[in-house]
Image (cartoon, helix red, strand yellow):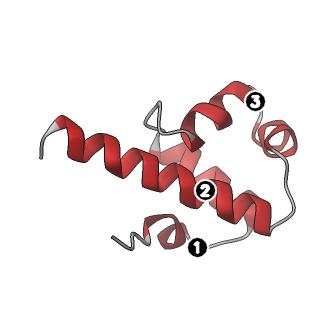
Amino acid sequence: MDNQDKKSILITFGANLRQLRLAKGFTQEQLANELGVEISQISRIERGVINTSVTTLYAISKTLQIDVSEFFIFDN
């Protein structure tokens, strides 16, 4: 897997997070506050700028009350 593939995965994952977050009625600020992280961290994840940890992913899924697998639905 080259760097372009990795970047594409991060961008798609971030877009999925954004869509799921909005569907659950959370702002970035509300989600960040629930998780105890900076708003900028949520923003960077959603834009595909950073790769988040498994523990943060788990916390996000619990906060949004969704299954972790929903973040990984990649329709190419």
Q: Secondary structure at mark 1?
A: loop
Q: Secondary structure at mark 2?
A: helix
Quadrant where the image shows the C terminus: bottom left
Q: Which labelled disc corresponds to residue 39? A: 3
Q: Position of residue 59 (x, y in %)?
A: 65, 51
Q: Are marks 2 and 1 in contact (CB under 8 Å)?
A: no
Residue at 53% over, 49% down? 14
Q: Are marks 3 and 1 in contact (CB under 8 Å)?
A: no
Q: Position of residue 5 (x, y in %)?
A: 22, 47
Instruction: Choose the circle earlier in sequence order: 2 or 1.
Output: 2
Q: Which labelled disc corresponds to residue 67? A: 1
Residue at 44% over, 47% down? 11
**As shown in the figure, which amino acid type bears the numbered disc 1?**
Asp
Q: Which labelled disc corresponds to residue 17? A: 2
Residue at 47% over, 54% down? 13
**As shown in the figure, which amino acid type bears the numbered disc 3?**
Ile
Furthest residue toward front: 76
Question: Marks 3 and 1: which is nearer the front?
Answer: 3
**As shown in the figure, which amino acid type bears the numbered disc 2?**
Leu
The answer to whether residue 49 is left or right of residue 5 is right
